[in-house]
Image (cartoon, helix red, strand yellow):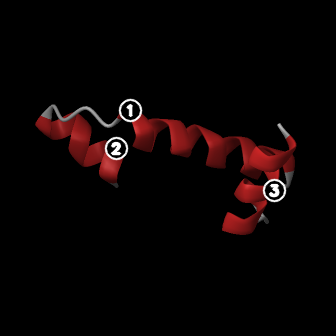
Amino acid sequence: MCLDVGEKTGARLPLTALVNQFYKHVQARASGRWDTSALIQLLQKD
């Protein structure tokens, strides 16, 4: 939602976009079944 509003209003949200990419990566690795703790695990491994 934040990225949608940012695009409509012209707001730049680079950190939000980056975190969104991390979540997409986590979901792709686990068929969308992981939660926020999976993001932390991913960042600790990489």
The amino acid sitting under disc 2 is Leu
User: Residue 19: where, in percent of width, then height?
Assistant: 54, 44
User: Residue 13: where, in percent of width, then height?
Assistant: 32, 37
The C terminus sits in image quarter:
top right
The residue tagged 1 is 14
Tell whether 7 sits left or right of 44. left
Question: Which of pointers 3 and 2 indicates the residue nearer the eye?
Answer: 3
* Residue that extends furthest to the front in the rendered view of this protein: 44
Within 10 Å of disc 3 (Cα), the crowding (few <14, some 14-19, many 20+) is few
Residue at 78% in and 64% down = 34
- Residue 33, quarter of the rendered image: bottom right
The reply to whether residue 10 is in sight is yes
Within 10 Å of disc 2 (Cα), the crowding (few <14, some 14-19, many 20+) is some
Q: Earlier in the sequence, mark 3 or mark 1?
A: 1
Q: Earlier in the sequence, mark 3 or mark 2?
A: 2
The residue tagged 2 is 3
Residue at 51% in and 36% down = 18
The residue tagged 3 is 41
Secondary element under disc 3, as helix, strand or loop, is helix
Answer yes or no: do the residues labelled 3 and 1 have beta carbons within 8 Å? Answer: no
Answer yes or no: do the residues labelled 2 and 1 have beta carbons within 8 Å? Answer: no
User: Residue 27: where, in percent of width, then height?
Assistant: 74, 51
Tell whether 15 sits left or right of 6. right
The N terminus sits in image quarter:
bottom left
The span from disc 2 to disc 1 (Cα, nearest Å) is 9 Å
The span from disc 3 to disc 1 (Cα, nearest Å) is 22 Å
The amino acid sitting under disc 1 is Pro
The amino acid sitting under disc 3 is Gln
Tell whether 35 sits left or right of 1. right
- Residue 41, quarter of the rendered image: bottom right
